Every structure is written in C-alpha cells, then in structure tokens.
Image (cartoon, helix red, strand yellow):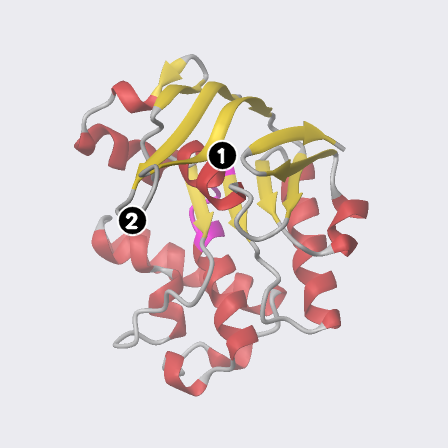
Amino acid sequence: MNIIAAAVTKEFIRQGKGTNRFVAVRPTDITIEPGKLTLLMGRSGSGKSTLLNMLAGLLVPTSGSVTYDGCDIYTLDDVKLSEHRMAHIGVIPQGQTAVHSLDVLENICLSYMISGNNADRENARAYARELCVRFGIDALGNEMPSALSGGELRRMAIARAMIRNPDVIFADEPTCDLDDENTALVLKILKETAESGTAVFMVSHEKDALEYADVRYSMNAGEISVM
C-alpha cells in the first residue's frame, strides 16, 4: 500500500500576543512505500509528530491530501476513517498509552477486544504471546501495566501496533525509554517488518536508526528535506 502526501500543511490557531497562527508543517510532499523503512529525524518541535499524525489519519491537514492507494483518507467520514485505520494502520505513539485496567496481553489485543469474534480474539491472543517473546516480555503477559518499567511498557505498545499485521506502521520515537540492547532489538524488528512488505514510517532522535533506514528525511521548522 502506497501512502502519498501531497502539499500537506498544518496550522494551529493559538491565543497570545502577536500573530495567533502557528505553522507546524509547511507544504510537504512525501511517499511512504511498502517494503521500506522510512526515517524522519529532527529536533523536538520541528513538526515531525504532526506530520506523522496527518499521515496516520489522526490529524486533519489544514491543506493538501493524504492518499492510500489513491483514496484520499480525509474525504472519508469518521466511521469509514476509523475502519480504515483499524484495517490498515498500526500506530506506536509517543508516551505511555497503556490501559491500566487490562493486563499486558489484553492491552496488546485491545483492538480485538473492541471488535472481533471469539475466534479472532483467541488467535490474536496466541499471536500476542509470540510478539511478547520477540520483544522479551513473554514473562509479563498476565502482569498489569503498573508492574512494568517504562521500557517494558514501550515494547508492549509496539506489540499492540503490530498485532493486526497492518499494511503500514507509524512509529513515533519507538525507542524512547529503551536501553541500548532493546533499542537495537526494536530497530531490528521494525526493519524486518519492513522487509516483509510492510510500509514503516519512523520518527526518531536515535542516530543508530540511520543504519536501519531505507529512506531518510530530516525536518526543521516544519520543512522536510532528504538526508
């Protein structure tokens, strides 16, 4: 599945002295291709996460279009857009997003708990256990999020994004809270996921991520450029 952003921009209106228009992303063209890990680097506040959220169907652009195999996702109504995200997109957001009333396996399988029949849920649970083994958290499946470290929570969130084998994964600083060993593990898994045919778009500060990327961009003050 090809994702093409054409002249996408994002402006925010905020209160305060002087101009109240803040341009987070200036006109940007970018293509995210299947089978490739696309890396976007840049300083905090440069617009990286804003661009990722627009590409992932989570933030409506001020102008421009985001198409998936020719379909402009922002012409879809809320229900159709939600269905599109569920069917095709996995998102690894910044920060901790665990549901604290659910254990680790339930958190990973959350989308199947919301929708899906009992057989789907059982299959998802089995696959969730496989993902836990890959990410080194297989002993934590029945633990509650409050018992996990920041790095363990991060790996759980990555497994949750991968549980449906999505066509595209958007990873926003996926290695934050991870030590060197687990950073290398996560980058290796994301690279292998791309090599299997998935489109992977990753925002990162990690210079180590450069060696895993097939396509490299940098962002500064809302403007994107090829590295």
- Asked whether 64 or 148 is in front, the reply is 64
**Residue visible at 44% across and 45% down?**
90
Say whether residue 122 is magenta. no
**Residue 3 appearing in the image:** yes
Q: Residue 82 placed where, x, y %?
A: 26, 37
**Residue visible at 43% across and 26% down?**
9
**Residue visible at 66% across and 44% down?**
41
Inter-mark Cα distance, 2 to 1:
41 Å
Q: Residue 92 placed where, x, y %?
A: 47, 53
Does residue 220 appear to the left or right of 49 in the view shown? right
Within 10 Å of disc 2 (Cα), the crowding (few <14, some 14-19, many 20+) is few
- Asked whether 6 or 43 is in front, the reply is 43
Q: Residue 159 placed where, x, y %?
A: 50, 59
Does residue 160 appear to the left or right of 41 in the view shown? left
Amino acid type, label 2: Gly
- What residue sits right under mark 1 in the picture? 167
Residue 143 higher or lower than 132, as above or below: below
**What is the magenta range?**
161-168
Q: Quadrant of the C terminus?
A: top right
Instruction: Report the mark closest to the observer, 2 or 1.
Output: 2
Residue 223 higher or lower than 189, as above or below: above
- What residue sits right under mark 2 in the picture? 16
Q: Mark 1: which secondary structure?
A: loop
Q: Residue 198 placed where, x, y %?
A: 58, 35
Earlier sequence position, callout 2 versus callout 1:
2
